Image (cartoon, grey):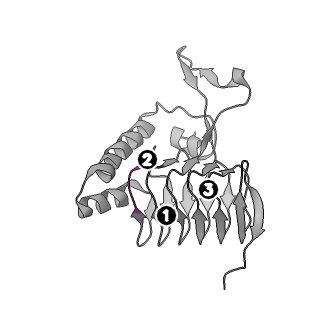
Amino acid sequence: MMTEHEKLLAGQDYDYRDPELQKMISQGKKLLTVINTTQDVGQRSTAIQQLFGRVGQRLTINGTFSAVYGAHILVGDDVFINGNCTFQDSNRITLGNRVIIAPDVKLYCGGHSLDATQRFGTRPDGTRYLITTTKPIAIGNDVWIGGNVTIIGGVHIGNNVVVGAGAVVTKDVPDNTVVAGVPARVIKPLAPLD
């Protein structure tokens, strides 16, 4: 039998009231409070290390940052996350090496049914709950995500990619490209990196 956390990561219907998940959310909120309010560089660095599932070398978070769990975020080396970014990490969010994320970027792993009759369920005790499914987001190496970009769960962004400001990324992005628009589409190739 799968735990609710395992169901969440598998993209299955899960109960967010599960004590394990609630403990993870609570721990994430405490660490985010430290990250977003302390002036002590050492305390902030320790809280970042404790929040994320993996942190590479030289991670910079410039300004406020928001996440649900934090533990599902895996970060490579030389990553820069600018202010007011939201990582709705109800599944894994993986950032490769040398990723730059501009201000106001939103990464959303969770989603709901297009069929309105399938958005809420009823538990055995008669209480209602919101049905959420999740999909991971993966961002490759040498990627620049422009300001105010939204990336939807299930998307894989390749290596050496630029995502133009304001884009909404709903589909995978191939290596060595510039994408922009709503929904995002390839607008220009980039020379492959050596």
**Residue at image point 31% right, 46% down:** 33
Q: CA distance from mark 2 to mark 1?
A: 15 Å
Mark found first going from the N terminus, 2 or 3: 2
Q: Which mark is residue 45?
A: none
Locate residue 179 relative to residue 56 in the image: left or right. right
**Above or below: residue 23 compared with residue 96:** above
Q: Amino acid at mark 3?
A: Ala
Q: Is the C-beta separation of discs 2 and 3 under 8 Å?
A: no
Residue 139 percent location from the top left of the image? 61, 62
**Residue at image point 47% right, 72% down:** 78
Label 2: which residue?
66
Label 1: which residue?
75
Mark found first going from the N terminus, 2 or 1: 2
Q: CA distance from mark 2 to mark 3?
A: 20 Å
Is residue 1 within the magenta segment? no
Is residue 62 within the magenta segment? yes
**Residue at image point 42% right, 39% down:** 20
**Residue at image point 61% right, 49% down:** 150
Q: Which mark is residue 165?
A: 3
Residue 29 percent location from the top left of the image? 36, 43
Residue 51 percent location from the top left of the image? 38, 54
Of badges 2 and 3, the one in the foreground is: 3
Q: Quadrant of the N terminus?
A: top right
Magenta segment: 61-65
